[in-house]
Amino acid sequence: MDQIQIFTDYLRQQGLKNTSQRMVILEVFLNSNLHYSTEELYLKLRKSHPRIGYATVHRTLKLLAECGLASELNFGDGQTRYEPCRGGQHHDHLVCTRCGKIIEFVEPRIEKLQEEVAERYGFKIMSHRHELYGLCSDCSVASES
Amino acid sequence: MDQIQIFTDYLRQQGLKNTSQRMVILEVFLNSNLHYSTEELYLKLRKSHPRIGYATVHRTLKLLAECGLASELNFGDGQTRYEPCRGGQHHDHLVCTRCGKIIEFVEPRIEKLQEEVAERYGFKIMSHRHELYGLCSDCSVASES
DNA sequence: TAAGAAAATGAAAATTACTTTCAGAAAAGT
DNA sequence: ACTTTTCTGAAAGTAATTTTCATTTTCTTA
């Protein structure tokens, strides 16, 4: 089942309506590998669909997060970002504090140790965030000058 | 060198002034093991020092973070929190999404794997955040009912 | 110690990101 | 088509944080 189907099913199931705006936002959102903030996605959409408002973009991103098609990210810059969930492997992020580049990483051994830690405290993990901040390879070279 | 000394040295070095407000805020902040938001610390301070303003508390917490005496935490509830840095071992957090309890954990093996991941991408880690969200032992028992 | 320069304070205003409101527009059921 | 319900977009409202500004305080320097 593709992502458009997942979304339309979710809308129907919730008694919500399938509007052209929602479809456009979903499509543009999916066809990118970026980590959009609401603002950024709104600005991008405005080029091709100038009539779509900020609030609609915001509300749609929330919906996408609800139905599992997007995940909310927060890198401490005061803006919530969204990335498409491709149903693949869970990943975390390296964030370059100089150029803003975001690299995704997968490290199952860390996931495993997390579980171990949680168990130590009788804690039941529902979600987590793990972000490494610093300089990406380009920027750490650049800053040596 | 104690923390008051670190702070006064930092102030002098930056050409900033050593005021009674700053000292009071530092003292109250250090004498607690909580993870204060600006609001919470302001309210606590107001009981003993009603003349201290919110903005001063906010500015002082920022200063403490700058000079390494506090670290900023962000658990996604829209409030920045601060905890005293005791120069001890680095720790991360388990956050109970039901009762708000915050448990600190230390897991050097995770720290080590992080470094390994960073190396994989030629990335130089400056800081990181790692938080596990879920139910603490009390709350997971309570929610079984 | 007093005077001057520089910075801090606290109240209020401004900013920022996000969320809600509301009147008109669009979708889905009848 | 008609009716009900939900959406939309613009604008207003929130909440946390940050800045402004007139006044006060601190830290030299005379």
Image (cartoon, coloured by chain):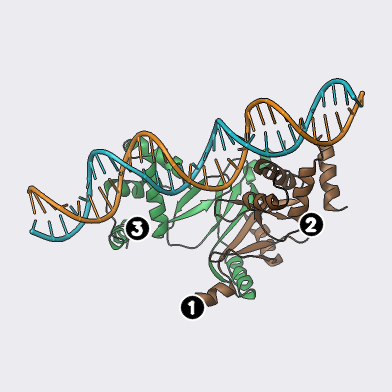
Chain colours: A brown, B green, C orange, D cyan
Q: Secondary structure at mark 2?
A: loop
Q: Residue at x 69, y 45 (%)?
A: A57
Picture quadrant of residue D1: top right
Q: Position of residue C30 (x, y in %)?
A: 92, 23
Say yes or no: labels 2 and 1 on the same chain: yes
Decide: marks 3, 2 in contact (CB < 8 A)?
Answer: no
**Residue A123 appears in the figure:** no
Q: Nearer the viewer, mark 2 or mark 1?
A: 1
Q: Position of residue D20 (x, y in %)?
A: 37, 45
What residue would you read off at disc 1?
A144
Q: Disc 1 residue type?
A: Glu
What residue would you read off at disc 3?
B3
- Residue B143, compared with residue A110, is above or below; it is above
- Residue B96, compared with residue B64, is above or below; it is above
Q: Secondary structure at mark 1?
A: loop
Picture quadrant of residue B4: bottom left
Q: Classify the position of the C terminus of chain B by image quarter.
A: top right
Report in which chain the residue with disc 2 lies: A
Q: Nearer the viewer, mark 3 or mark 2?
A: 2
Q: Spatial distance from mark 2 to mark 1, Cα to Cα? A: 39 Å
What residue would you read off at disc 2?
A87
- How many residues crowd around disc 1 within 10 Å: few (fewer than 14), some, or many (20 or more)? few
Count of labels in the image: 3
Q: Secondary structure at mark 3?
A: helix
Q: Position of residue A95 (x, y in %)?
A: 59, 63
Q: Nearer the viewer, residue B6 or A78?
A: A78
Say yes or no: labels 3 and 1 on the same chain: no
